Image (cartoon, grey):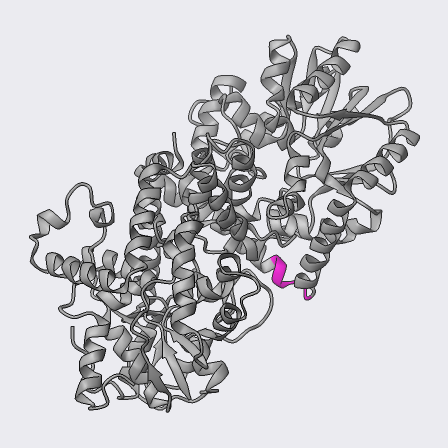
Amino acid sequence: MSHPALAQAFVDNRERAQWHDKALWFVREKRDRMAASVPEWELLRETASGIKRHTQSRMAEYLEQFEANATKNGIVVHWATDAHEHNEIVLSILQRHSVKRLVKSKSMLTEECHLNPFLEKHGIDVVDTDLGERIVQLRKETPSHIVLPAIHIRKEEVGECFHEHLGTEKGASDPNYLTEAARHHLRERFCQAGAGLTGVNFAIAETGGIVICTNEGNADLGVGLPKIHIACMGMEKLLPRAKDLSVFLRLLARSATGQPVTTYSSHFHGPQPGCEMHVVIVDNGRTEILKSPEFRRSLDCIRCGACMNTCPVYRRSGGHSYEATVPGPIGSILTPLQTPEKHNSLPFACTLCGSCTDVCPVKIDLHQQLFTLRELLDNKRLIGTSKKLSMKVVSGVMSRTWLFNLLGGIARTSLRFMPRFLIYNPLNAWGKQRDLPDAPKQSFRQQYAERQKQKGGGKS
Amino acid sequence: MKVALFIPCYIDQFYPHVGMATVAVLEHFGVQVDFPDAQTCCGQPMANSGCMDEARPLAEKFVNTFDGYEYVVAPSGSCVSMVRNHYDHLCDHHDERSAMVRRRTLELSEFLTTVLKVSNVPGRFPHQVGLHQSCHGLRELRLGPSSEVMKPRDGMMESLLTGLEGIRFSTLSRRDECCGFGGTFAVAEEAISCMMGDDRVNDHVSAGTEVLTAGDMSCLMHLEGIIRRRKIPMRVMHFAEIMAEAIGAEKGVRSV
């Protein structure tokens, strides 16, 4: 289905769409207060953008530096060209150690690679330990937001889900009670797990270490208890120096949730004694994006989700309307770049308001890229024949002033005399919930010409 | 000073009074206005649809029509942004004429503020005004401070209106959220577009807006469409109309 159809379905439940919009706007406002409390906020954004652009320009160099330093630290580094290779690598590590139970903290990359169903098919029990992700997993859904995966679900629905799966009291929806139940349930899973898998927020080339930011401490528990830690990262997560974190850690949580910093910013520089640590570095189309000057900067993304929280379309259409691992503005760039045929409606699920560009902590020119992406879709003949045809017609009319004047006059006259039911026919999408403007007798240029004549000067 | 007036195609056809108000305001401040008759559309609908081949002839036509003027002024931030920010991609990079036209095309409040240095507008407008911040004017032309960016900046339209006798401004809960028009988005994503418009209108109703205004008639066409359908008693006026009415320079030019 296309975005407009799924968005329409989401909006049909107006009360829910309004609640969803308000919940995310609340996060956006928290972000505004936090950003305003940092006097050098704009300088931080500028610096972060500069560091990212520098890193992308020397990607290969920094990746090799990271690999060398991580290996020195005792980390096993793996390289995966695509999702399939990534999944195979993770599976082979687990199989080598006969791991049957895996606990995971949040990783959008493994969502992108569809790791969970792949591992489950091979008989491995996968438990997402981020509370929101666990809720989504129990409901057999996908995350609708990259930072707040269960933002589309109300607490009453969480209560129902937990009643069914965790045996909480029927009808209970108190967040504290439900969280406590999830805590007990997850604690058990942590203790039973043979391996822990995490995402990576930042990988530091200079130190060969990685940084993982969470609010629940689930990454730390997940890798601290089992003997094997597998960290999966897209290759763009790289930063050159440890001191770059002083820029990014200040931006990340403030932009994401309006917190001064995430509750846990955990640094991992190698395995515990007697344990193993693996880092899987994934390309999966990123090199292609890196090659394109127009879209390269989309790889600067630090996955804070601020563009989703601010996007007036995302807030009202819900994350699932994008049918993509990463929804919202950044997802509407990354996803169609990979699968333009399937996701051709996403770059148009946008009014080009530019709020995402202004909110982005690393200054990705998001709405400009969405604009450019539309041209790319047109070049691939993926914008739809009726749209293309109407644009050809309009362009032809507008290229001829006399024709524009003639047809404009005819349209205005028809609108003036056509009965309302004919104007507001079922094909008129504009008129479903909106009136059309009144059609004036004269166009501006006619009025202006008359006025000039009256003034006696004619056209100046 | 001789200035070319660019009246966007939909204003030409549906809002002639906005064009006339723009003329009145410019003439009030001593500008000699010329309306080049060949003008039609800047090409934005095509460009926003990804159809650059269809937008290109209109960009070229625009440059040919407005070449040679000291300034080109339009009562629309969105169309001006199209010319200023996207024509470099559509026109020949080495064409000095297109570069000149691009640089010299200004939005009305921008022209009044930065070129004419108008600061105090005499006049009276005893109403509560709700200022809708049109996105392209705000975030692409930077005609005012966007709520996301932590950098103080004066809002040009607000500064021009604020001195008018009796004027009051609405305090909105979301001061610069998009109205949901978005060109073809308004039709292609009708459900979201109308919900966004409803939310903006509701914000203005709660704030007590008597007159809703903006620098772009396209946002106002969408919002007025909703206001009329819902029969909400709120006047909708382009920024140029308020200026013209306030300074009393609009005698005899309003005819709908």
Dividing the image into 4 quarters, which one contains the C terminus of chain A?
Answer: bottom left
Q: Which residue is at the front of the view, A310 or A221?
A: A310
On the picture, is B14 further left or further right than A14?
A: left
Residue B189: tell me if it is visible.
Answer: no
Q: Is residue A362 above or below residue A234?
A: below
How far across and down, in percent of the image, does residue A96 sit?
79, 10
Q: Residue at x 31, y 78 (%)?
A: B35
How far across and down, in percent of the image, does residue B25 sit?
33, 84
Q: Is residue B81 highlighted in magenta?
A: no
Q: Is residue A36 highlighted in magenta?
A: yes
Dividing the image into 4 quarters, which one contains the N terminus of chain A?
Answer: top left
On the picture, is A49 further left or further right than A173?
A: right
Which quarter of the picture shows residue A210? Answer: top right
Count of number-bearing discs = 0
Q: Residue at x 10, y 47 (%)?
A: A422
Magenta-tinted stretch: A34-39
On the picture, is B150 further left or further right than A315?
A: right
On the picture, is A196 further left or further right than A20?
A: right
How far across and down, in percent of the image, does residue A175 sit?
52, 35
How far across and down, in percent of the image, does residue A334 sit?
57, 38
Q: Which residue is at the front of the view, A417 or A305?
A: A417
Q: Residue at x 51, y 38 (%)?
A: A327
Q: Residue at x 73, y 18 (%)?
A: A89
Q: Which residue is at the front of the view, A81 or A275?
A: A81
Residue B45: tell me if it is visible.
Answer: yes
